[in-house]
Image (cartoon, grey):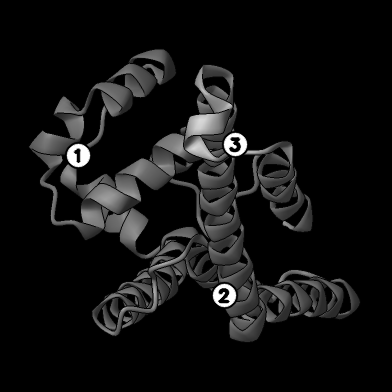
Amino acid sequence: MKKYYGSRSKISLLPHQVRWRIYNLMLDGATLKSLLADPEIDAALAIAGFTLNDHNLSFARKSREFIDFVQMRSKYLERKYKDMMSAAIAKGAGALESMTEQTRCKLMENLSELADLSGLPDEERIKAVRSLSQSVASLSNPVKDSQIAELKRKLADLEKKNEALLAEIVNLKTATDQNPAERGLSENAIRQAEEKIKLL
């Protein structure tokens, strides 16, 4: 069942998605002509069996729904503007170099939106905010990120050393097979190289 605010108007008879589209376009400065030319609005008006005029738009501007929509849109745009500024500052400071930081920023954005949802029961809002806060805290651990990066670097170094030692063993075996006496190679030398690999 549709919920109407204030006096009924022609616009209030349209589906809520269409009404909100009209409000958005009105706030963006759209004229009556451009509203009527919009395919989505035009289709909805055709189904409803009426059209709109300047009086309808003027009446809609005074409705409770439009006033609420203006306030909610204003809050939303203000939040988005702040988020864009924060992202620009973070990017300029080199803080978005890792996926962890990007995820943390997204969680912070969601946290900000949750804090503004006055329609949620207080208990549910507190639970959601606490959960997101814990997620942010676990993702924003530079010490842990640094340790992981260091371990990855050490692993890559060990893999390179391992490859080098394997190549050395192959060369030693090849040389021994060709002429062990001339090259002065022994099973002992090969065994030593293999021991090096085990130590890694």
Left/right of residue 20 with respect to residue 32 in the rendered view: right
User: For the residue labelled by badge 1, is the local secondary structure a helix, a strand or a loop?
Assistant: loop
Residue at the spot 9% in from the left edge and 35% down from the top edge: 33
**Hey, what amino acid is under mark 3?**
Ile
**Label 2 amino acid?**
Met
- The C terminus: image quadrant: bottom right
Q: Residue at label 1?
A: 53
| In the image, residue 39 above or below residue 31 | above
Name the mark on residue 72.
none
As shown in the figure, which amino acid type bears the numbered disc 1?
Asn
Mark closer to the chain start, 3 or 2: 2
Q: Would you name the residue on which mark 2 appears?
A: 108
Spot occupied by residue 4 in the image (x, y as percentages of width and height): 59, 50
Q: Earlier in the sequence, mark 1 or mark 2?
A: 1
Q: In the displayed orientation, state which residue is furthest to the front.
A: 181
Q: Is label 3 in contact with label 1 (beta carbons under 8 Å)?
A: no
